[in-house]
Image (spheres, grey):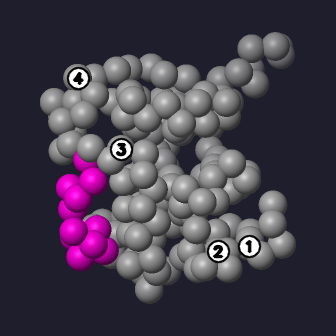
Amino acid sequence: MNADISRPVRLGREFADEAARVLRVSFDERLPSLAGLHTPEEDSWFFRNRVFQDCSVWGIFGGDGLVGIVAFRPGWIDQLYVLPAHQGRGLGASLLRVARTGACELSLWTFQRNWGARRFYENHGFVAVEETDGSRNEEREPDVLYRWRPCENAFLGGT
């Protein structure tokens, strides 16, 4: 990791606008056909009033401010985004480690055609357990449910 990149830190609501920016830039880069689904003001409202209310939110800072976020609650990762310019440097893995701390199971949704995210999750032990046609999500985009269960595997080899 670069020297100008911080370790993950817990974020407060005062970072809602920056966290929303990380989501939007990352989302629009991976899925340009869905760009503009929400305004920056709507994204900020969502983070301030939903994500920070329901989740533990952590971030990583670089020279240009907040560069990655993870928002999680018991059993779920709701958001995990790293700015495109900072991807491939281990930041997503650092954020994922924070969410995994003390968890025996985590689930998350991603879009089926987001191959970068799918590879990332599969490389970190997540397994696809369900695919949908997208009729239940706001974007109407086919998605996939991933699950990670390290505690289940810990009991397979012992007595």
Q: CA distance from mark 2 to mark 3?
A: 24 Å
Give the labeled residue for mark 1: 6
Quadrant into which the N terminus falls: bottom right
Type of amino acid under label 1? Ser
- Image coordinates of residue 94 in percent, x first then y, are 71, 55
Question: Label 2: how many residues lie within 10 Å, few (<14), some (14-19) or many (20+)?
Answer: some
Q: Residue at x 54, y 60 (%)?
A: 83
Q: Is residue 147 visible?
A: yes
Give the labeled residue for mark 3: 31
Q: Secondary structure at mark 1?
A: loop
- Image coordinates of residue 64 in percent, x first then y, are 60, 79
Q: Residue at x 22, y 30 (%)?
A: 134
Type of amino acid under label 4? Asp
Q: Quadrant of residue 19?
A: bottom left
Of labels 2 and 3, the one closer to you: 3
Q: Is residue 103 above or below residue 99?
A: above
Q: CA distance from mark 2 to mark 4?
A: 36 Å
Question: Label 3: how many residues lie within 10 Å, few (<14), some (14-19) or many (20+)?
Answer: few
**Circle nearer the N terminus (3, 4):** 3
Give the labeled residue for mark 4: 133
Residue furthest toward the bottom?
14
Which range is magenta?
34-45
Q: Residue at x 23, y 76 (%)?
A: 41
Give the labeled residue for mark 2: 61
Instruction: Locate residue 150 relative to residue 121 in the image: left or right.
Output: right
